[in-house]
Amino acid sequence: MNNILKISYRNLKRNYRRTLLTASLITIGVIFVLIYTAMSGSFKSYTVGQITDSLMGHIQIHKKGYVASVDNLPLDKNLNAKMLEFIESTLASNPYVQSYSYRIKFGAMFSNFTSTTNIRLNAINPKDEFPTLPLLESRISDMNGTFKPGEIIVPELLIKGMDVKIGDTIVLVANNKNGSVNGINLKVAGIVGQVMGPGGRDGYIHIEDAKKALRMNNELEISEIVLRLKDVEKLGVAEKSLQPLLEKFNKEGKPVLEIHTWQQLSPFYNIIKMIDIMNISIQIILISIVLISILNVMIMSVFERVREIGTIAAMGTPPLTIVKLFLCEGLMLGVFGAVVGSILSLGIVYLLNIVKITYSIGQQSGLILTPSLGINEILSVSIIVILISLVASISPAIKASRLDPVEALRTY
Amino acid sequence: MVKASHLKKVYRAGEIDLEVIKDFSLEINEGEFVSLVGPSGSGKSTVLNMLGCLDTPTSGEIIIDGVSTKAMSRTQRANFRGENIGFIFQSFNLIPVLSVYENIEYPLIMIQNLSENERKSRVLKLLEEVGMLDHKDKTPDKISGGQMQRVAIARALVTNPKIVFADEPTANLDTKTAHMIIDLMKKIQREHQTTFVFATHDEKIVSNVDRLITLVDGEIVADQRMNQ
């Protein structure tokens, strides 16, 4: 095999300009795909991280019908104490769940005593919410100490629009599920930056304040439970493990609860799917480049060497050995493109991380692109390129092996 | 050594069947140095191709060293050629990317798969016999036509074939070099006791052969045993 490789290498070298051009084309294709994958991966992981770790968690549990009317933030579709007891008992024994947090979501009037506007709020218990959404704290600025009852974290757009500052007192006025109106005074304790996705512009108050504002008295009612998984890669398995929750039925025989993953709740998941589709499209383009380049080179190679093929066939080289010779040439082009392309891509990714390219998404600006290439991405692209190189060489190799030695020797 | 019985070769040219070899029968004995002569188009190359298992006759049978080649597949014929037959071509047909040494070594690697030591000893011995030892590291484009044919002779003999076929081995050489090549072939044939059959249209260079077969229009018109 070493000798076949040696002869194949020399055959490639005899037309080194053409070989170099083809190998460069494959290399550029590999670089293009890997850099695109690294950059889109950075964007994807940042966005998915923001959505799951600062906004939605990995899985949410609601009372049946809540998600369908989530835009209205309905208080009559909250989870009651009995349901919570049942959910907690299930979650306690679930091996996939790392932590969870209760939320009351409601709409209110936000007044700074001179003007009033609407606000959407998440009432949370910071002790549960922050571990469940580890990036949430990083979205909150200008906050001193921990988030306590009596405080409100205001969305940044509202801070600017209502001209309020940290430490100001504001009034929240909210209707409870019975239509009763109540108002509470709160101190502005922090500013929360907005992110993409549902709830990305919501403010935060302590769950105890929400109970007061909504006059829940002693019975806690929760809009949603946000779950953080130990391993987000096991989202599907974790969702299945929560199926017992859906087996609790009401008097009409319908499920009482509903479970959604972040992928089902966030419209951004479709964009992520689009990025994945574009990744596949780019890989198809790469495959085409490799296929056409190598096919072209190998066909040219066979046509140029008909007489030589005739000679080695006449000497008794078996057809299979001739096939191997040509396959090795294609393989070498593919391996060269994959190896050099991967090395250069790693270098470019390293440089991109030094240069720190920034980008903006909506109101969020100054986001730093942190592209990275994993061994899986490099291996998958390399394997595709090498396999396609082999596939592209098969037809010319078979053609070479089937040449009639007598006809081939007559060729000038 | 070689027994060809009632060989016929017909090529189809459009609607016309062209019979280039007509009822050709021949026996070549082991160790003979045979020349096939005849004008262009007489069928010399076709006969050599059939006897060398490169081409198959339309009808008839060839037996080489007791083995009939009639029912062999492409791969079987290739293997048979690799083990039993050597070829020398008019245009030398050396592989341009390989050195002189590697060109001779090539059949041992690709066909006979011998150990490196065995390959080395065989190649160096033949390089010395054909007088090309000093040029072993040169590529074919750095040597003359006569030298290329010497390398081609060494390459044909390196597998220790039972028979060597040479198709117009001197056609691309000047007369002096052509005589030197024929003499070299004869010398090696004597030393190796290998059967040699070569085709030529130049009767001036065949004075040194054991047997002279004259072919005209696909038929043997004369088969002379020469007294040396």
Image (cartoon, grey):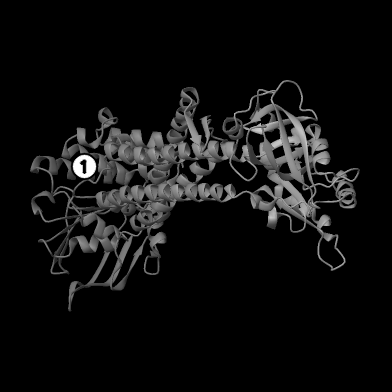
Secondary element at image label 1: helix
The image quadrant that residue A173 belongs to is top right
Q: Chain of mark 1?
A: B
Q: Is residue A197 above or below residue A257?
A: above
Furthest-bottom residue in this view? B15
- B99 relative to A338 in the view: left or right: left
Looking at the picture, which amino acid does disc 1 mark? Gln
At a point 32% along the width and 45% down the height, the residue shown is B157
Q: Is residue A393 above or below residue A129?
A: below
- A218 relative to A345 in the view: left or right: right
- B184 relative to A361 in the view: left or right: left
- A267 relative to A132 in the view: left or right: left
Residue A367 visible, this angle: yes
**Where residue A322 sits in the image (x, y, percent)?**
38, 51
Name the foreground residue: A363 vs A235. Answer: A363
**Where residue A245 sits in the image (x, y, percent)?**
83, 55
Q: Is residue A9 above or below residue B223?
A: above
Name the foreground residue: B33 vs B138. Answer: B138
Residue B103 visible, this angle: no
Quadrant containing the N terminus of chain B in the rendered view: bottom left
Q: Decide: few, some or many residues near mark 1? Use Cα within 10 Å; few <14, some 14-19, many ≥20.
A: many
Which residue in the structure is indicated by mark 1? B149
At a point 34% along the width and 33% down the height, the residue shown is B124
At a point 34% along the width and 58% down the height, the residue shown is A399
Furthest-top residue in this view? A144
The image quadrant that residue A163 belongs to is top right
**Where residue A77 sits in the image (x, y, percent)?**
78, 54
Name the foreground residue: B140 vs A236. Answer: A236
At a point 67% along the width and 24% down the height, the residue shown is A166
**Where residue B92 sits in the image (x, y, percent)?**
22, 45
